[in-house]
């Protein structure tokens, strides 16, 4: 089992920035990818960014590319999502996820099998 705990959400005005953190613990030996997903009210959960843990190669959804940056610490015990130039449409519950499946360059939530509880991000115009 892998445990994930998100933090860092909050309320900001459009154009502002936030940094989300995800603490990773447990049996991480078979964690191949880490990802950030989000779910707005009435919408499906969608992938935002992912990283291949071993190679540190990251990928992004087109809606956030150039604005969001996913990083991981050298000990592989935390991942971060730096969000800049936030827009009202970025408002959602943001989830950290881990995958022990075929996840390379994927933002398909079905490949991610461990999830955190989520942290709320609200962007006002």
Image (cartoon, rainbow, N blue to C red):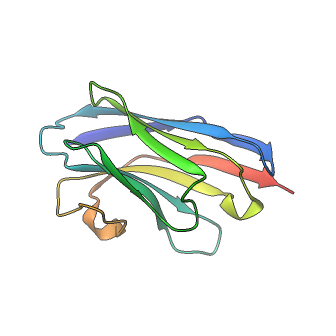
Quadrant containing the N terminus is top left
State the image coordinates of residue 46 (x, y, percent, origin top left): 48, 68
User: Which residue shows up at 50% across the image and 45% down it?
Assistant: 69
Q: Viewed as shown, does residue 80 lie left or right of 90?
A: left
Direction left: furthest residue: 29
Q: How many circles with numbers are drawn on the protein?
A: 0
Direction top: furthest residue: 75
User: Which residue shows up at 63% across the image and 48% down it?
Assistant: 120
Q: Is residue 42 above or below residue 80?
A: below
Quadrant containing the C terminus is bottom right
User: Which residue shows up at 17% across the image and 60% down it?
Assistant: 101
Direction front: furthest residue: 66
**Residue 87 or residue 98, whichever sits in front:** 87
User: Which residue shows up at 44% across the image and 56% down it?
Assistant: 49
Q: Is residue 14 above or below residue 81?
A: below
**Residue 55 or residue 23, whichever sits in front:** 55
Q: Is residue 8 above or below residue 44?
A: above
State the image coordinates of residue 59 (x, y, percent, origin top left): 39, 57
* Residue 79 sits in quarter: top left
State the image coordinates of residue 31 (x, y, percent, origin top left): 19, 45
């Amino acid at each position: 089992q892998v445990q994930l705990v998100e933090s860092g959400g909050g309320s900001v005005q459009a154009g502002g920035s936030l940094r989300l953190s995800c603490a990773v613990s447990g049996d991480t030996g078979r964690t191949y990818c880490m990802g950030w997903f989000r779910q707005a009210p009435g919408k499906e959960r969608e992938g935002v960014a992912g990283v291949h843990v071993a190679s540190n190669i990251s990928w992004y959804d087109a809606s956030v590319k150039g604005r969001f940056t996913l990083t991981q610490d050298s000990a592989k015990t935390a991942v971060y999502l730096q969000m800049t130039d936030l827009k009202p449409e970025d408002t959602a519950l943001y989830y950290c996820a881990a995958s022990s499946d075929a996840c390379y360059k994927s933002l398909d939530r079905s490949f991610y099998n461990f999830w955190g509880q989520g942290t709320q991000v609200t962007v006002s115009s």
